[in-house]
Amino acid sequence: MSTAKLLNDTTANGKKFFLQFGGQGSPYLKEVSKLYKEEPLLKEFFEVAFATLSKIESDVGKSDILIAEGLDLKSWIENPDSAPSDDYQIRGSVSVAMIFITQAANYHLLTLKGFPVDKLTAATAGVTGHSQGIIGAALAALAKDGKEFYTTFAEFLTFTFYLGYRAQEKYPLFTVEQSVLDGNAEIGDKNPAPMVAVIGYSKDELESRVEAANNDLGYTGQDRLNISLYNTPDSMIISAKPSSLLGFRKKFKAEMDERKAKFVYLRTTAPFHCPFMEGTWEKFEVDLKTKVHFPYTVADLKLPLYSIYDGRAYSKSENLAEVLFKEIVIKALHWDKAVGALFTDSSIATVIDCGPSAVTSKLTGGQLTAKSLTTQVLCLSNNKDLKVIFEA
């Protein structure tokens, strides 16, 4: 395999890469279909993915409402008319695994087309992932190659599926009550969901408004509003029941309109990254003993893996399975902390984003801009960036 020019230039200049992986809410079917149809190097990868999904579907049973239309990604790709509705594709019990497959395919293709695992690892300063992307980052940090990579990928895919399954099981509601739909329609909002992006407030401003809404509207327990993801200095996500989010929106809509702030529901089906999801770990812990073979520890990581909660590099004393699960499902995400190495490590010249979509690369760009940094961000889901990444 010839080494890509970007890798050669980076190492020759004593510089480093930083790898990141995207999160929930990203469209995946079109991207994964393109990889399957156009990249013969990924033949074995997809064989492993399809076989693993088939086993999972058999073990869970299609009668289970959370995967009622199955997990037959191969058929969805080869016969697009057979693909289930978008509403089904975005279920956490389905999309979390499919998003992981897409980004793992992007990462694996990178290692097969000019960035050999050993050389890429040596030239990388660290890895992280936005929300569920931290699982893809952990896979990359293990630096597995050849047949060993496929074994590890299959085990990570099973781990990822059951994580999404347990999260969705906590909130198994795929339809929004009519009163909430009507309330959103009355004020011009569409597609209410349990997570919403609020753009145009600072951290302190949004935190004070969330606190005010919880107090003034009497939201307690599972009705509470929680800021779940701090993406950029003026873009954050609130997780809560759609009815609570509607209450928040009504309370502050006039102010949002005046300052041109945005309120955009996410294409997701569970309120990730918030206390609503407490209690999910205990069931997943049983899965780890009965359904999921996940023998990996932090000591196995060949690269620093940065927490999306507080930016620390995972320590060898931590349980890798537990910390991944809780940071994705229960704890809040602070993207500035996750990519903090970009602000302190001057050797990092290029961020390579493994998708899916370019959403996370834009979030990182926003963080860099806020710090007046010009670190190059390239995304494997962006055709223009691919030319730079894979130039021979």
Image (cartoon, rainbow, N blue to C red):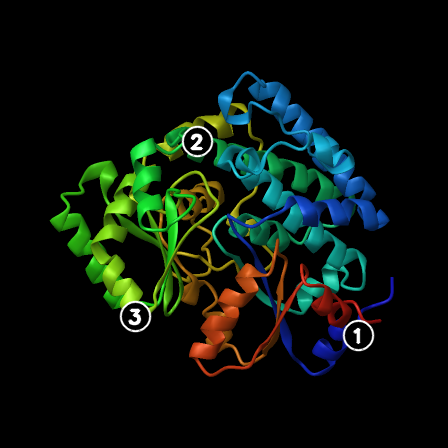
Residue type for callout 1: Lys
Taking depth in this image into account, of 332 and 31 the one nearest to the observer is: 31
Q: What element carries label 2?
A: loop
Cβ atoms at labels 1 and 2 below 8 Å apart: no
Marks 1, 2: nearer the viewer: 2
Q: How far apart are marks 1 and 2 (CA)?
A: 47 Å
The amino acid beneath tag 2 is Phe
Q: Name the residue under label 3.
A: 259
Real-space CA distance between mark 3 and mark 2, rounded to the nearest whole angstrom: 33 Å
Whether residue 85 is visible, yes or no, is: yes
How many marks on residues? 3
* Residue 324, placed above or below residue 390: above
Quadrant containing the C terminus in the rendered view: bottom right
Q: Is mark 3 on a helix, strand or loop?
A: helix
Calculate the distance from the C-alpha at mark 3 to the C-alpha at mark 1: 46 Å
Left or right side of 61 for 222: left
* Residue 185 location (% of width, % of height): 35, 44
In the rendered image, the residue lying farthest to the front is 186
Give percent across and percent down for residue 184: 33, 45
Which residue matches tag 2? 174
Q: Crowding near pointer 1: few (<14 within 10 Å), some, many (20+)?
A: some
For residue 248, side relative to residue 239 (left or right): left
- The answer to whether the residue labelled 3 contacts the one labelled 1, judged by CB atoms less than 8 Å apart, is no
Q: Name the residue under label 1.
A: 5
State the image coordinates of residue 366 (x, y, percent, origin top left). Answer: 47, 72
Image quadrant for the N terminus?
bottom right
Earlier-in-chain disc, 1 versus 2: 1
- Give the image location of residue 12, x and y in percent: 74, 81
Which residue occupies 66% across, 37% down?
Answer: 154
Instruction: Compare residues 348 and 53 and report the one nearer the observer.
Output: 53
Closer to the chain start, of discs 3 and 1, is 1
